[in-house]
Image (tube, helix red, strand yellow):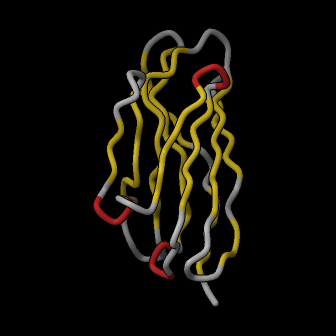
C-alpha cells in the first residue's frame, strides 16, 4: 500500500521560513512525479510546485523566487523550502505523487497546516 507522510507545517511570522517534507512508502514503487498543492479556506486546491524524475521543476507564479522544491530519490522524499512567507500563504499543504505500483496512480498526503501570522 502506497502512503505519503508529510511533516514540517506550523505557525510562522510573515517573512519567516518553513520546510515541508513528504516521504512516499510502499512495496516496489516507482515514483514519477512528486509535488505540492495547497488549499486555503474557501478556495480551490492549487498547484504550488512539482518535480518529475528527470529533475525538471514547475513552479506557479506565487512560488517563484520564494519556494524551492527538491527531491531525495533514494528516500522517495520531496521537500518544499518556503522563504519570505506571507499571510496569503496560509493554507493546508498537500503532498502529491504519481507512483507506479506497478501501474501509475495519483496519491495524496493528509495535508499539513501552514499558518503565516504575526
**Quarter occupied by residue 76:** top right
Q: Residue at x 46, y 64 (%)?
A: 39
Position of residue 103 measured from the top left corner of the image (x, y, whole percent)? 44, 13
Q: Vertical placement of 1 versus 111: above or below?
A: above
Q: Position of 103 compared to 90: left or right?
A: left
Q: Is residue 71 left or right of residue 88?
A: right
The answer to whether 109 is drawn above or below residue 1 in the figure is: below
Residue found at the far left of this picture: 61
Q: Residue visible at 43% across and 22% down?
A: 32
Callout count: 0
Q: Please tell me in which quadrant of the rendered image residue 112 appears.
A: bottom right
Quarter of the N terminus within the rendering: top right
Residue 23 sits above or below residue 84 on the image: above
Quarter of the picture containing the C terminus is bottom right
Residue 110, image x, y percentages = 63, 50
Q: Is residue 53 left or right of residue 59?
A: right
Q: Which residue is drawn at 42% across and 76% down?
A: 42
Q: Which residue is drawn at 64% across and 19% down?
A: 74
For the residue pair 112 and 118, the one nearer the viewer reads as 118
Amino acid at each position: 500500500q502506497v502512503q505519503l507522510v508529510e511533516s514540517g507545517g506550523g505557525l510562522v511570522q510573515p517573512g519567516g521560513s518553513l520546510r515541508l517534507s513528504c516521504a512516499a512508502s510502499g512495496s516496489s514503487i516507482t515514483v514519477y512525479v512528486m509535488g505540492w498543492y495547497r488549499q486555503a479556506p474557501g478556495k480551490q486546491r492549487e498547484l504550488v510546485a512539482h518535480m518529475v524524475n528527470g529533475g525538471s521543476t514547475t513552479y506557479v507564479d506565487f512560488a517563484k523566487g520564494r519556494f524551492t522544491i527538491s527531491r531525495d530519490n533514494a528516500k522517495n522524499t520531496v521537500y518544499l523550502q518556503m522563504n519570505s512567507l506571507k499571510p496569503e500563504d496560509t493554507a493546508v499543504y498537500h503532498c502529491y505523487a504519481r507512483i507506479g505500483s506497478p501501474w501509475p496512480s495519483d496519491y495524496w498526503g493528509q495535508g499539513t497546516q501552514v499558518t503565516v501570522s504575526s
